[in-house]
Amino acid sequence: MALMDFIKKQFIDIIQWTEDDGDTMAWRFPMAEMEIQNGASLTVRESQMAVFVNEGKVADVFGPGMYKLTTQTLPVLTYLKNWDKLFESPFKSDVYFFSTRQKLDRKWGTPNPVTIRDKDFGMVRLRAFGIYAFHLTDPKAFHTTISGTLESYTADQLEGQLRNTIVGHIADIFGESGVPFIDMAGNQVEFGNALRAKMEPMFASYGLALDSLNVQNISLPEELQAMLDKRIGVNMMGGMQAYTQFQTAEAIPLAAQNEGGLAGIGAGLGVGLGVGQQVAASMAQSLNPAAAAPAAVAPAPTPAAAPVSADEIVATIEKLHGLVGKGMLSQAEFDAKKAELLKKLG
């Protein structure tokens, strides 16, 4: 029994790694107190690489294949151990395996909106999210900068660092591009390519290759998006004047349902300006289209207009000024009506 324990303790004949999950990126072969003997077999499977580390120094790196461990296949280790011929006694060395398979569908996104200066909207806050994929290309760089002497290292352990670094560069991309938000949202592929080009050097410094980086969405926070939707609606209606006319037409049927509603609209738009009569005509046309046709009936005599007091004229001017502030009346229209009313004071 003691002899068998001694043999098991001393010699390792086969060094290999059969991955049992899709997340592990680096794995240290369990050496314990065992030793590697001359002629031992190293098996590195497709999508793997292996690294021998001697006393903390990275020595030989192996790609996929099966190797017989000799001084010929371990030239760097041979140099570090000062072997001048085939080593005859077993030796100890840390052996690390690395997975080079692509890590797909890794997600990134802005946890908080990024504030930028936009050409169209001024200062705005933007959100963005998407996916990226990468794989390990340089096990030596990854070992020295990321995984180190850990028994194993997973993609999940690395994901937070990669995701936060991507998000940290988004503000730079937004600012450097100078592209308005509207155009940026419509060119997500180009934005993703620019972001990928900015991130590739950082990934390379970790021994990784950034295979793809896609932007799935660029958006405004909800409150700003609601304002943008309203602005788009106004533009689709043909501008603020057409939008105001549309709102007035929508209000006519509602006013007709309330007693005095139509008169209220006329009074609200100005005494003596004839706007109430225009609304009444529109109301009559909407309720009875046939009445809109010219009738061969003599027009009824127009009653003499009641004299308008100075207080009423002043009140009307104030109401008209309020409509200017609401965008329902232009400044030029207000000035013309104001002048017309002031003449009546004379």
Image: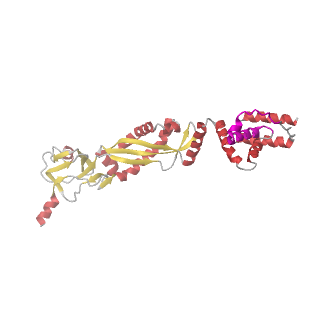
Residue 138 seen anywhere in this rendered image of the structure = yes
The stretch in magenta equals 272-300
Location of residue 305 by image quarter:
top right
Closer to us: 83 or 192: 192
Closer to us: 54 or 321: 321
Q: Is residue 143 above or below residue 191?
A: below
Quarter of the image with the N terminus is bottom left
Q: Is residue 160 above or below residue 170?
A: below
Q: Outermost residue toward the bottom?
A: 1
Q: Outermost residue toward the front?
A: 296
Q: Position of residue 18 (x, y in %)?
A: 23, 53
Closer to us: 33 or 147: 147
The colour scheme used to paint the residues is secondary structure
Is residue 174 highlighted in magenta? no
Location of residue 166 by image quarter:
top left
Q: Is residue 33 above or below residue 280?
A: below
Quarter of the image with the C terminus is top right
Indicate left or right for 160 with 222 as reference.
left
- Which residue is painted at 70% across and 36% down in the image? 292
Is residue 290 highlighted in magenta? yes
Q: Position of residue 57 (x, y in %)?
A: 27, 48
Residue 327 seen anywhere in this rendered image of the structure = no
Q: Position of residue 124 (x, y in %)?
A: 56, 43
Q: Position of residue 241 (x, y in %)?
A: 66, 36
Location of residue 202 by image quarter:
top left
